[in-house]
Amino acid sequence: MPIGRRLGVCLLALGGVLAATGAALAQSDKLEGPLIRPAVSSKDPRDLSGVWFIRSYNRQINATTGRVPDLTALGKSERDRRVQAEKDGTPVADASAYCWPHGVPRVMNSPYPIQIIQKPGETLIVHEVAHNVRHVYMDVPHSNPVKTAFMGESVGHWEGDTLVIDTLGVDPRTWIDEVGLIHGTKLHTVERIRKVEDGHTLENQVFIEDPDYYPHPWYMRDTYAWRPDLRIAEYSCEENNRNAPVNGHTVAK
Amino acid sequence: MTMKALLGAAALALLGSTASAQPFYKAPPAQDFDGVWLIQNAPQALKATDGKLPPMTPAAAKIYQDHLAARKAGKPDFDSIQQCWPHGFPRILTANYPIEIFMEPKQVTFIHEVHHFPRLVFLDAQPVKIDDRDQNWMGFSTGHWEGDTLVVFTAGFNDKTVLDPAGLPHTTDLEVTEHIKKTDADTLEDLVTFHDPKMYSKDWSTSLTYKRQPGRRLAEYVCTDVNPEASPK
C-alpha cells in the first residue's frame, strides 16, 4: 500500500491542527499501479462491484447549494462551538478520533478507497478508512424499532439503475462532516447511487434530514472514480492512536 | 413467426434481461461459502491435529510459558486485543464471533464481527516475495481453488499478535496456509498450517470448524466503545 495513504491516517485525524487535505487529495485521482480490474466498470448499470475512490474530498461538506446547509439554532451553536475549538487548537473529538466507526453519511466522505461487493439480499461496502464496514440489506424493511449503531441500519433497493439506500439509527456521536455539521437521533439519510460517465464514475446523491439540527432537508453529492488499480489495504486506527482524545478534545502527539 | 410475435418475443427478452439484471456472481454449490458462519468450540489453546501442543522450539516454549503465567496472573499484556488492537491473523479465526463470507470470482471476503475487521483473499494475486512483504496485522492473503477446496496463503505479519488466546507465539516469518472446504451444506472446515521455523521445529496444522448461522446478521462490535479500559477518555 502506498505510504501516502498511511500517512494520511494521522494527518486526517488531526483535523484542523494540520492542513491535511492537500496531502490526502494528491493521492486520490492518480492511478498508481498495474490494473487489477478492467479499466472501466462493467457495462451492467447495476454492477457496482469493485473499488472506488472519492473525488473532491473536503473536510467541510457543503449542501448542493454550494454553501453550508441551513442550520437550526441548535445546529448553528454546535457547529460554531466546534469551529471555535478548532481555531483554539483544541478540536472537539469526533467518532473517528476515538477509532469508532465514522457513521453515515460521514463514512462516504473519506479520502480512502471503498470496495462494493454485491450478492442477493445484501450490498457490502468495505471502507479502507478505519476498517469501516457497511452492510446494506436489500429489499427488506427497517427493523422496528431500529437499533442504534455507529453505522446505523441501512436497507436498500433498486429504482431502475439507481441503488437507493435508506439509513436510520445512526449513533449521534458521529458527525456529518469533519468541521462541525452534526446530527441527533432523528437523522435520516437516503442515498441514491448510480454509475455515470459510462462506468468511470459513481455518483451518490444524499438526502439528509434531521429537524433538530437542520430546518429543512438538504442534499449533498459525492462522486467516486473507478479505481481498477487499487486493493483495499489494512488500516488500524486503534494501534498507536496518536490523536487519542483527552477530555473530549483531539490532541496531537 | 409473425412480425408481431417477433416483436413480442423481443420485448419479453428485453424485460427478461432487465428483470434478471442481477450482476451477482453465484459460486458453484460446493465452492459457495456465502453466508454467516460461527466457529464451533472456539479454542482457547490451539492444539495440533494430533491433539498435542505444536512442536515448539526452546525459545517458543519459554515465551509460551511466560504468556500462560501472565494470563493466570490476570495480566495478559502480551495480548494485542487487551488494547483493542487487532487480533491479527490467524488469531481472529478462532474468535467466538460470527464471520460473514462473500464470494466473488476474484476475491473471497471475510467480514469478522469482532472488531468489524475485514479480511480480503485475492484470487488474482500472487504471494508477495519474502523481502517485499509488509508487516501487517492480517498479512496479505492470496488464494486459489484446488477442486472445491480454497487454498489460501497468508504472510507478511507483524509480531505483535499471538496465534491463540493462550499465547502461542510467532515471528514476522510466519506463513499460514489454509485449506477451506465445505464438509456439508452447513459446515465449513478450515485446516490451518503454520510455518515459522524460529518458533516451531516443524510445520503443524490445526482444524477449525464453522457452522452456518441462517438468517443471522453481523452485529456492530466496536472495541473502543465497549471496552472503556482501552478507550481514550
Image (cartoon, rainbow, N blue to C red):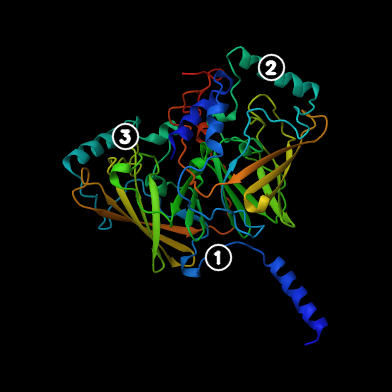
Is residue B121 left or right of A17 when viewed as pictured? left
Judged left or right of residue B89, residue A249 is right
For disc 3, the neighbor class at 10 Å (few under 14, some 14 to 19, many from 20) is: few
The quarter of the image holding the N terminus of chain B is bottom right
Q: x and y percent of residue A157 in the render? A: 71, 54
Q: Which residue is mark 2?
A: A81
Task: Report the amino acid beneath label 3.
Answer: Lys
Label 2 – label 3 distance at C-alpha: 48 Å
What is the chain identity of the residue bearing mark 3? Answer: B
What residue is rendered at 55% in x and 53% in y?
A39
The residue where tag 1 is placed is B26
Q: Of label 1 and label 3, which has the lower sequence position?
A: 1
**Marks 1 and 3, how far apart in space?**
47 Å
Q: Does residue B174 show up?
A: no
Element under label 3? helix
Q: Quadrant of residue B174?
A: top left
**Residue in the picture at 68% in, 24% down:** A180
* Residue B10 visible (yes or no): yes
* Local crowd size for mark 2, using a 10 Å CA cut-off: few (<14), some (14–19), many (≥20): some
Q: Which mark is residue B69?
A: none
Question: Mark 2, chain letter?
Answer: A
Residue occupying the far left of the picture:
B58
Gap between marks 2 and 1 measured at Cα: 51 Å
Residue type, mark 2 in image: Arg
The answer as to whether the residues below labels 1 and 3 share one chain is: yes
Chain letter for the residue marked with disc 1 in the picture:
B
Amino acid at dot 1 = Lys
The label number, if any, that marks residue B72 in the structure image: 3
Q: Secondary structure at mark 2?
A: helix
- Which residue is at the front of the view, B99 or B154? B154
Instruction: State the residue at coordinates (78%, 29%).
Output: A212
Question: Dot 1 lies on which element?
Answer: loop
